[in-house]
Image: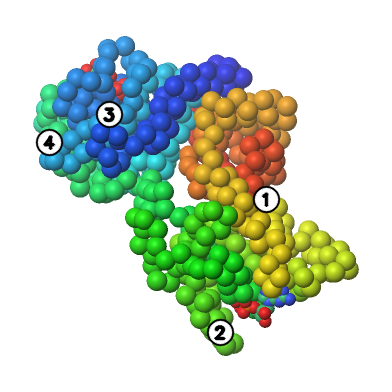
């Protein structure tokens, strides 16, 4: 098969599964209406024919997931409600991938990537009678980085004689293989116990945020930039800081602020309100505090003193925000001090100083006069919207294949790298994974990010792009 052919088939094989991706994405949008609270999600991944559907049926305790002897039959339903020992959880069956294609390892690695970013635990199934194939190894490579708990299941262990083959699966580096026979039910109760032990009580998608609660904002910047003045202005204009919002408890160090008919939670503002002035030498603690505020927020307003040259300290705060992956609004304060000369000068400084964050939302404000502070809320909303954006896998892949056709990646070592498949592995911030046949140069990755922003916006939000190169070994299969 030529490279061009394999490129085509890889795309065909993965694109035809759009319905599955849509269903996977849908699994996170719909709260379980019947029981109220959303349940933790267990994703089941693995290559075709290892017995995923049979195992899902076992877990569900009923014959709901259709199993057919034709390998890789696309199933129309992919999430199921399950229950064991009185605990409810959701099973996400990521089946329905066509076998035998060149692009299979890439597609299944993408599936694993998706699972580990979205599910609360990942069950990876391998066929003990076959042993670890290079596709299994590709999946294991992805999952070894997982912070989400991973349970390795050795399936088709219908009898004890297969135990040495089970032990051989330690080589995948995913810990102890759990032997089961999905077909006969052997060990499935123990597996369910292990699944419950791995799943958290509450699903990750709602972790840390009170669903529907105020969005969390960090107001940060170097000393004397006007943080406490701005906070006072924002709260003062509305006469009072909101004390409580139905269903939320406010950490005493936070302030609930009503801006533009919406309540926002400004995190870690106790120090600002008390106007704590850090003496020299305290800078280290100030910086720790800034970092903590950013980490507990969803979006940061970084205040910059427009009346002064952009300083090293401003850039350090910006770097913290970029590294945290939070949405960003740049507020140039003390705009009342900016005259025409200073404005021209500032433009030059910004070109140099803000190269890393050309995408940030910007507003020019004055905490002193109240100028344009009303523009903060719309800027916060826009950047959070970008931060939450999800692009469907089908849309992303058709866009990227047009882009690559128009401007292919530069040839390296006589080879033209191909982008086999792209998926958005997560939001907050939007995180994309490109599965490729070769190394993509940094310049080309930046080009993709720029084009992605031109097409989809993402104003005010960082965007992360990672590249997974398909290894040679997988190609030979
Ligand atoms: P999927 O493609 O990973 O969802 O795999 P299926 O659940 O469709 O199973 C593929 C084939 O393996 C079917 O013929 C199953 O009957 C068979 N199978 C599944 N689990 C077991 C098992 O524990 N033992 C044996 N011997 N066969 C199994
Ligand atoms: P913080 O250390 O970042 O909390 O900064 P403060 O709010 O304490 O402000 C530091 C100084 O800048 C104070 O003297 C404020 O009056 C002054 N200041 C704050 N905002 C503005 C502004 O928009 N314009 C002008 N001219 N001065 C400001």
Q: Residue at x 43, y 72 (%)?
A: 253
Q: Residues within 10 Å of mark 2 (few under 14, many from 20)?
A: few
Question: What residue sits right under mark 2 in the picture?
Answer: 278
CA distance separating discs 2 and 1: 31 Å
Q: Are marks 1 and 4 in contact (CB under 8 Å)?
A: no
Question: What residue sits right under mark 3 in the picture?
Answer: 80
Q: Quadrant of residue 162?
A: top left
CA distance separating discs 1 and 4: 51 Å
Picture mark count: 4
The quadrant of the rendered image in which ligand 2 is seen is bottom right
Q: Residue at x 67, y 44 (%)?
A: 446
Q: Which mark is residue 359?
A: 1
Of the two numbered discs 1 and 4 in the rendering, the one whose residue sits closer to the viewer: 1
CA distance separating discs 2 and 4: 58 Å
Q: Residues within 10 Å of mark 1 (few under 14, many from 20)?
A: many
Q: Specify the color scheme.
A: rainbow
Along the line of sight, the residue nearer the viewer: 39 or 337: 337
* Sequence-first tag of 1 and 4: 4
Question: What residue sits right under mark 4 in the picture?
Answer: 189
Q: Is residue 361 visible to the viewer in this orientation of the structure? A: yes
Q: Residue at x 58, y 55 (%)?
A: 260
* Sequence-first tag of 3 and 1: 3
Along the line of sight, the residue nearer the viewer: 206 or 325: 206
* Sequence-first tag of 2 and 4: 4
């Amino acid at each position: 098969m030529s490279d061009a052919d394999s490129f085509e088939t890889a795309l065909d094989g993965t694109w035809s599964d759009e319905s599955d991706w849509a269903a996977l994405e849908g699994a996170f949008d719909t709260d379980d209406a019947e029981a109220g609270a959303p349940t933790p999600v267990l994703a089941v991944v693995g290559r075709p024919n290892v017995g995923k559907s049979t195992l899902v049926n076992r877990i569900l305790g009923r014959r709901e997931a259709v199993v057919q002897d034709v390998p890789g039959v696309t199933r129309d339903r992919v999430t199921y409600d399950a229950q064991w020992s009185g605990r409810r959880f959701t099973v996400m069956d990521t089946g329905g991938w066509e076998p035998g294609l060149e692009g299979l390892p890439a597609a299944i690695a993408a599936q694993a990537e998706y699972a580990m970013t979205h599910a609360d635990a990942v069950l990876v199934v391998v066929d003990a009678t076959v042993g670890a194939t290079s596709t299994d190894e590709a999946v294991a490579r992805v999952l070894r980085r997982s912070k989400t708990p991973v349970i390795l299941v050795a399936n088709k262990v219908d009898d004890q004689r297969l135990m040495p083959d089970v032990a051989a699966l330690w080589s995948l580096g995913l810990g102890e293989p759990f032997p089961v026979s999905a077909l006969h039910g052997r060990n499935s109760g123990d597996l369910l116990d292990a699944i419950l032990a791995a799943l958290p009580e509450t699903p990750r998608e709602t972790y840390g945020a009170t669903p529907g609660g105020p969005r969390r904002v960090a107001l940060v910047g170097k000393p004397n930039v006007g943080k406490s003045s701005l906070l006072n202005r924002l709260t003062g204009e509305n006469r009072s800081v909101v004390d409580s919002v139905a269903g939320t408890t406010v950490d005493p160090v936070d302030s609930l602020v009503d801006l533009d008919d919406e309540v926002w939670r400004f995190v870690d503002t106790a120090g600002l309100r008390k106007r704590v002035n850090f003496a020299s030498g305290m800078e280290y603690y100030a910086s720790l505090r800034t970092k903590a505020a950013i980490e507990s927020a969803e979006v940061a307003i970084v205040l910059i003193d427009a009346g002064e040259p952009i300083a090293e300290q401003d850039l350090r705060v910006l770097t913290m925000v970029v590294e945290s992956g939070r949405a960003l609004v740049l507020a140039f304060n003390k705009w009342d001090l900016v005259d025409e000369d200073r404005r021209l000068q500032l433009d030059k400084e910004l070109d140099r100083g803000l190269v890393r964050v050309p995408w940030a939302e910007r507003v020019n404000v004055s905490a002193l006069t109240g100028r344009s502070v009303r523009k903060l809320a719309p800027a916060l909303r826009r950047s959070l919207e970008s931060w939450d954006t999800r692009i469907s896998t089908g849309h992303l892949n058709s866009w990227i294949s047009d882009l690559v056709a128009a401007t292919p990646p530069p040839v390296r070592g006589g080879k033209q790298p191909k982008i086999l498949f792209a998926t958005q592995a997560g939001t907050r911030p939007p995180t994309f994974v490109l599965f490729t046949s070769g190394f993509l140069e940094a310049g080309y990755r930046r080009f993709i990010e720029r084009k992605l922003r031109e097409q989809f916006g993402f104003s005010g939000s960082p965007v992360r792009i990672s590249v997974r190169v398909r290894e040679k070994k997988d190609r030979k299969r």
